[in-house]
Image: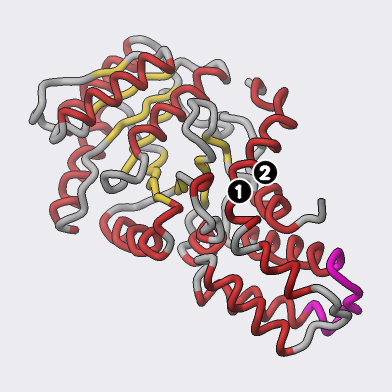
Amino acid sequence: MGFFSLFSKEKKQTLDKGLEKTKEGVWGRLKRAVAGRRTIDDDFLDQLEEIFITSDVGAETTLRIIERIQARAARDKYMGERELNEMLVEEISDLLAENGGEGGSGDFCLPAGSSKPYVIMVVGVNGVGKTTTIGKLAYGYKQAGYKVMLGAADTFRAAAVEQLDEWGRRADVPVVKQQLGSDAAAVAFDTLQSAVANGMDVVIIDTAGRLHNKKGLMDELTKIKRVMERVVPGAPQEVLLVLDGSTGQNAFEQARQFSAATQVTDLAVTKLDGTARGGVVIGISDQFKIPVKYIGLGEGIGDLQVFNKREFVESLFANR
């Protein structure tokens, strides 16, 4: 199941390329702030705070990072840009590691000991790349050797079903769907029944992308989960919230609302290649204590990556 580990170099190149706008835009200011310095003083910390906040890391996480840098600087003698970059990589990686979730191996693989089919219910508002992320997930798991099935439970938009159907074709995985306006829970139920009958390893369920009423959303998602449990006890094993990284603080608000509406277990942050706001991944991962599991770095079917904290932070800060 280690198909993607064969392409670790290519994946690193994709990560670096996908974060170019963040590195060259906001994070590029870091080099100017460091230039000529031999010590970390209040003026530098003020500049560092501004850089983090304007890259949508978030105020709370920024303060936590600044505190760690201050404490580290008091212990270690600061010598220059290289040492500061190493300090940032270590302290931010350690901060994220404290908030749960593994760093990620880079592979699309199921958790050890998980029952089959492993069910992923995907939630998120319209326009964040939810259905596209599902298609890329399906492709990743399929390439890793798993049998994958999709369920089109976003039955309120004809475009959503059609789009999922197209992604299923591209990923070469079956899609279970019903007529527009059908009961979403019934689609999920039929999908799991078919998955069990056909020996599927992974089932990915799309859901309606709206958040106009928390109670209505909670009721619908609760119903979907309840009917799935009748077929696969414990389903869904994963509730994946998809967020658009280019929306900055709006992504934080969506994370808050969906976390209140349902039990989100993992996050996918998309569209990072088109924004200088890549710091949002650090802030969301830290503040919500919900692991970022996947990041979207392009439009290609293979441009969704399993999130590795250390590699992500190194790509932003490490000397080149």
Residue lying furthest bottom in this view? 42
In this rendering, the count of numbered labels is: 2
| Label 2 close to label 1 by CB (< 8 Å) | yes
Give the residue number, with chain letter if any, for mark 1: 19
Left or right of 48 in this view: 100 = left
Residue 273 x, y percent position in the rendering: 53, 45
The foreground one among 296 and 97 is: 296
Residue 221 position in % (x across, y down): 22, 44
Q: Which residues are magenta?
A: 72-83
Describe the element under mark 1 as helix, strand or loop: loop
Which image quarter is the N terminus in?
top right
| Position of 15 relative to 214 (above/below) | above
Residue located farthest toward the left when viewing the structure as drawn: 181
Q: Amino acid at mark 2?
A: Asp
**Residue identifier under label 2:** 16
Specify the amino acid type for callout 1. Leu
Q: Is residue 75 magenta?
A: yes
Question: Does residue 254 appear to the left or right of 98 in the view shown?
Answer: left
* Residue at 57 percent of width and 61 percent of height: 99
Q: Position of residue 19 (x, y in %)?
A: 61, 48
